[in-house]
């Protein structure tokens, strides 16, 4: 790698990281909701690796892991295992979003979407996106939720 290529690469990396942090999205959900955590890879490019993680989790495990053209539920963190799936299993148009089902208060936090694609030049390209998930009770629902809205007794 010559110096101009290295400089261009470092500049691109700094721009990518800066852009990613400025573009962090925030989603608010209520306990029990299913929520889509949005993430997109470049359209038409083969996804080599997709890692959804939650940096706040202290132990090993992913929120979602896809590589070698399949997902790996056994690598999911126990707190989300069985509750996460691709929004579009075929990842059409670069949609690598995931659905987190039956959200709990413990699901609140920052999620990272890390995608590695193979571009037409044969070089792997990485992107990262960050989503902030806030889980709150709806106003007037501080007792944990009255699913029948008070229509039933007992």
Image (cartoon, helix red, strand yellow):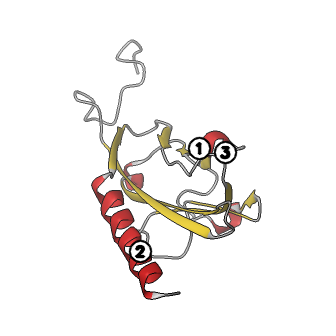
Image coordinates of residue 132 in percent, x first then y, are 34, 52
Residue 91 - label: 3
Above or below for 118 versus 147:
below
Tell me the crowding category of disc 3: few under 14, some 14 to 19, or many 20 or more residues within 10 angstroms, Cα based.
Answer: some
Image coordinates of residue 123 in percent, x first then y, are 64, 70
Q: CA distance from mark 2 to mark 3?
A: 30 Å
Earlier in the chain: of badge 2 and badge 3, it is: 2
Q: Residue at point 34% right, 65% down?
A: 15
Q: CA distance from mark 2 to mark 1?
A: 28 Å
**Side (left or right) of 92 relative to 80:** right
For marks 2 and 1, give the one nearer the viewer.
2
Q: Residue at point 49% right, 76% down?
A: 59
Earlier in the chain: of badge 2 and badge 1, it is: 2
User: SS of the residue at dot 2?
Assistant: helix
User: SS of the residue at dot 1?
Assistant: loop
What residue did someone put label 1 on?
A: 95
Residue 8 - label: 2
- Is there CB contact under 8 Å for labels 2 and 3? no
- Is there CB contact under 8 Å for labels 1 and 3? yes
Q: Is residue 134 visible?
A: no
């Amino acid at each position: 790698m010559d110096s101009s290529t290295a400089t261009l690469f470092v500049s691109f990396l700094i721009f990518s990281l800066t852009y990613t942090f400025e573009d962090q999205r925030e989603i608010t959900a209520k306990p029990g909701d299913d929520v889509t955590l949005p993430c997109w890879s470049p359209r038409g490019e083969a996804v080599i690796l997709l890692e959804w993680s939650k940096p706040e989790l202290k132990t090993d495990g992913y929120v979602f892991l896809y590589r070698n053209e399949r997902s790996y539920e056994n690598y999911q963190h126990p707190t989300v295992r069985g509750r996460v799936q691709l929004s579009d299993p075929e990842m059409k148009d670069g949609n690598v979003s995931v659905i987190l089902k039956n959200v709990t208060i413990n699901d609140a936090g920052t999620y990272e979407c890390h995608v590695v694609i193979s571009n037409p030049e044969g070089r792997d390209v990485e992107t990262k996106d960050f989503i902030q998930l806030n889980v709150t009770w709806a106003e007037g629902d501080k007792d944990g939720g009255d699913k029948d809205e008070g229509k039933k007794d007992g």
